[in-house]
């Protein structure tokens, strides 16, 4: 099949760790590669955010990344991109009309959905949508700090009725969309995937201090990821170090306001010697960091899916996670890890201390985690199931035509 992927702010070419560069970028990159590996041809459309970018960048066999001129060719926060989605749609529709008409278009994020639904008016292309995050959830947790465009929730509601299929990544997301009025018949539950060839128990591990336990968390340096809760939990976990992977490059941590806040908090709690901020870590180094850890902690306030717990599981590392969103699907409580209430440092510290003190339980969790990652989340399995969705909406579109 010819598959168009639309990811207006999250380019698969972007370096991870920035405020708007994280799980969606990785999801789009790895999903595109997995689909290409099954013989499909893909174009990933993303907004041009630099005048120096080529029009088209080959991204492995069978995948091209297309930079769409929509708005100024500079980096902008994703919440400022809505006014440019009309131009994005017009340019993409012309590209399809010039000869690369896809069999299906898969939009990632609601603004991509708007652009894709607009473009299909000229080409009658079936549209699949993955939200990745919902405005109603963000508003609930961030309140006045939410910088989303004013009508985001209304757009998301209408998109759920306008597209041919919505890919929901967890049961929590399905429930939220049902409350918005999106028909259950429009939804297919299909989680994100993990590269089990890259993330596996076999391979090198990052160096660590002998005789000390290691807790690893992988997150952008923003408040909603719950890193402060982890630091507050650390006094309850004696003899353990906390390593934080994510954020700006290591050389910029000293001037990053949130990194400074985390370091001040660690100093106040007298755990500075046990907290290490790595900054952005190259993707190829992450498996070694996972393997070096006794436990991975994922403690966001909310999380549509969460890729780092899945990568940890594939590496055979148990996960302690907030019982929110997609994490309640990914982490099987008492089997592959432990779930704790969000924003509760006391419960988090207790769970970490108990797990680190029980070698047999950690080993059992790790073995179960590897099996779950391989059989439920390996990218070839996810891509094959998604291909079935694409084929079904393409057939339905052809029947209507």
Image (tube, rainbow, N blue to C red):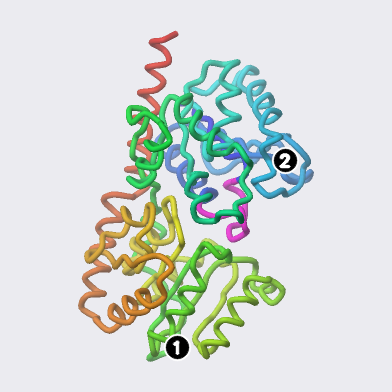
Residue depicted at x 37% and y 24%: 391
Query: Of 58 and 124, which appears nearest the observer?
Result: 124
Q: Quadrant of residue 255?
A: bottom right
Note whether 71 is above or below 137 in the view shown.
above
Q: Visible in this render: residue 361?
A: yes
Picture residue at 68% right of the left edge, 71% below the top: 257
Residue at 63% in and 17% down: 97
User: What SS does tag 1 mark?
Assistant: loop
Q: Is residue 85 magenta?
A: no
Instruction: Give the side of residue 374 with respect to residue 393, left or right.
Output: left
Residue underneath mark 2: 54
Q: Nearer the viewer, residue 289 or 118?
A: 118
Q: Residues within 10 Å of mark 2 (few under 14, many from 20)?
A: few
The quarter holding residue 142 reads bottom right
Q: Position of residue 166 (x, y in %)?
A: 42, 33
Which of the two residues, 55 or 297, is positioned nearer the viewer here? 297
Disc number for residue 209: 1
Q: Is residue 16 magenta?
A: yes
What residue is shown at x 43% (from left), y 56% (from top)? 307
Q: What kind of secondary structure does the magenta stretch mostly adopt? A: loop
Where's residue 95, x and y in %? 65, 23
Q: CA distance from mark 2 to mark 1?
A: 45 Å
Nearest-to-viewer mark from 2 and 1: 1
Q: Secondary structure at mark 2?
A: loop
Q: Earlier in the sequence, mark 2 or mark 1?
A: 2
Q: Is residue 194 above or below residue 51?
A: below
- Specify the quadrant that holds the C terminus: top left
- Residue 79 vs residue 220: left or right? right
Range of magenta residues: 10-23
Residue 218, which numbered label? none
Left or right of 259: which side holds 243?
left
| Mark 1 surroundings: few (<14), some (14-19) or many (≥20) residues within 10 A | few
């Amino acid at each position: 099949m010819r598959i168009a992927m639309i990811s207006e702010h999250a380019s698969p070419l972007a370096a991870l760790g920035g405020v708007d560069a994280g799980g969606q970028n990785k999801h789009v990159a790895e999903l595109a590669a997995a689909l290409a590996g099954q013989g499909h041809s893909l174009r990933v459309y993303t907004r041009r955010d630099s005048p120096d970018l080529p029009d088209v960048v080959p991204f492995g066999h069978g995948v091209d990344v297309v930079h769409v001129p929509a708005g100024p060719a500079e980096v902008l926060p994703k919440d400022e991109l809505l006014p440019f989605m009309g131009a994005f749609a017009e340019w993409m529709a012309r590209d399809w009309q010039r000869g690369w008409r896809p069999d299906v278009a898969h939009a990632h994020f609601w603004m991509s959905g708007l652009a894709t639904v607009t473009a299909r008016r000229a080409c009658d292309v079936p549209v699949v949508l993955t939200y990745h995050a919902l405005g109603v959830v963000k508003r609930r947790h961030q309140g006045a700090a939410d910088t989303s465009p004013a009508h985001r929730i209304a757009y998301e509601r209408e998109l759920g009725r306008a597209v041919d299929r919505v890919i929901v990544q967890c049961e929590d997301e399905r429930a939220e969309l049902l409350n918005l009025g999106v028909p259950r018949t429009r939804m297919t539950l299909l989680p994100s995937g993990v590269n089990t060839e890259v993330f596996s128990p076999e391979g090198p591990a990052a160096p660590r201090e002998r005789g000390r336990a290691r807790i690893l968390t992988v997150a952008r340096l923003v408040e909603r990821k719950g890193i402060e809760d982890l630091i507050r939990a650390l006094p309850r976990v004696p003899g353990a170090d906390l390593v934080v992977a994510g954020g700006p490059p290591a050389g910029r941590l000293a001037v990053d306001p949130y990194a400074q806040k985390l370091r001040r908090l660690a100093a106040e709690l007298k755990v500075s010697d046990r907290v290490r901020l790595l900054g952005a870590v190259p993707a190829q180094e992450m498996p070694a960091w996972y393997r070096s850890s006794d436990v991975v902690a994922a403690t966001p306030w909310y999380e549509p899916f969460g890729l780092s717990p899945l990568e940890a599981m594939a590496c055979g590392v148990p996960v302690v996670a907030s019982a929110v969103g997609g994490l309640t699907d990914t982490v099987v409580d008492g089997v592959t890890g432990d779930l704790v209430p969000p924003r509760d440092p006391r419960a988090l510290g207790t769970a970490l201390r108990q797990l680190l003190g029980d070698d047999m339980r950690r080993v059992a969790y790790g073995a179960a985690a590897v099996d779950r990652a391989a059989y439920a989340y390996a990218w070839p399995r996810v891509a094959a199931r998604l291909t079935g969705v694409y084929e079904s909406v393409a057939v339905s579109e052809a029947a209507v035509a």
